Image (cartoon, rainbow, N blue to C red):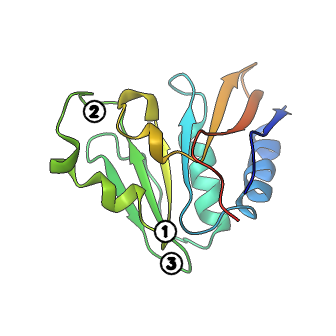
Amino acid sequence: MLDQFQHSYISNSIEETKSWAHTFADFLYPGLTLGFQGNLGAGKTFIIQQLCKKLGYPGPIQSPTYTLVNEYPGPQLIYHLDFYRLDAHRNWEDLGMEHYLGNQEAIALVEWPDKSPYVLPYIHGYIEISHLGPESRAIKFTTGKRPWPR
């Protein structure tokens, strides 16, 4: 089990961000739930696209802003969730989110996890992305309150 851990990285280009995501993907495995934070356009979806590609999903990857969840089958099942438009008071059970966030056979990648207090107990770690310039980003990974297994 991994206790509180933090890692920061400065990316100066799209290629460096892609490389960081591909390296980070090597540490992901089924049962993990990661939250992605950052302003609109910071690169949350781009990093998720790179993680999914590295994990073997060959198809298109788009943010599920209106559908809440996209499922990417492949060698590794991935759930991509986006809570940007989620009403924080909406009934969590009616949405069936436990299936996606508590699934031990999939990796769940959640954009805007702070939009719902119900998702926070499921988060193993956060990736926070900040603009530094047109192609430069600060990327910070921090473990969440839920223990990182293994």
Residue 76 at x, y = what percent?
55, 75
Question: Measuring 75% from the left and 28% from the top, which residue is drawn there?
Answer: 137
Whether residue 112 is visible, yes or no, is: no
Q: Nearer the viewer, residue 27 or 66?
A: 27
Image height of 97 relative to 118, above or below: below
Is the C-beta separation of discs 2 and 1 under 8 Å? no
> Mark 3 or mark 2, which is nearer to you?
2
Q: Secondary structure at mark 1?
A: strand
Q: How many angstroms separate mark 3 from mark 2 (CA)?
A: 27 Å
Quadrant assignment, res 84: top left
Residue placed under numbered mark 2 in the picture: 86
Residue picked out by circle 1: 106
- Work out whether residue 8 or residue 71 is closer to the camera in this orientation and state it: 8
Residue count near mark 3 (Cα–Cα under 10 Å), binned few <14, some 14–19, many ≥20: few
Q: Report helix, strand or loop for mark 2.
A: loop
Q: In the figure, residue 14 lies in which quadrant?
A: top right
Report the front residue among 130 and 35. 35
Amino acid tagged 3: Gly
Q: Position of residue 150 (x, y in %)?
A: 71, 65
Q: Residue at x 76, y 43 (%)?
A: 17
Task: Read off the residue under disc 3.
Answer: 74
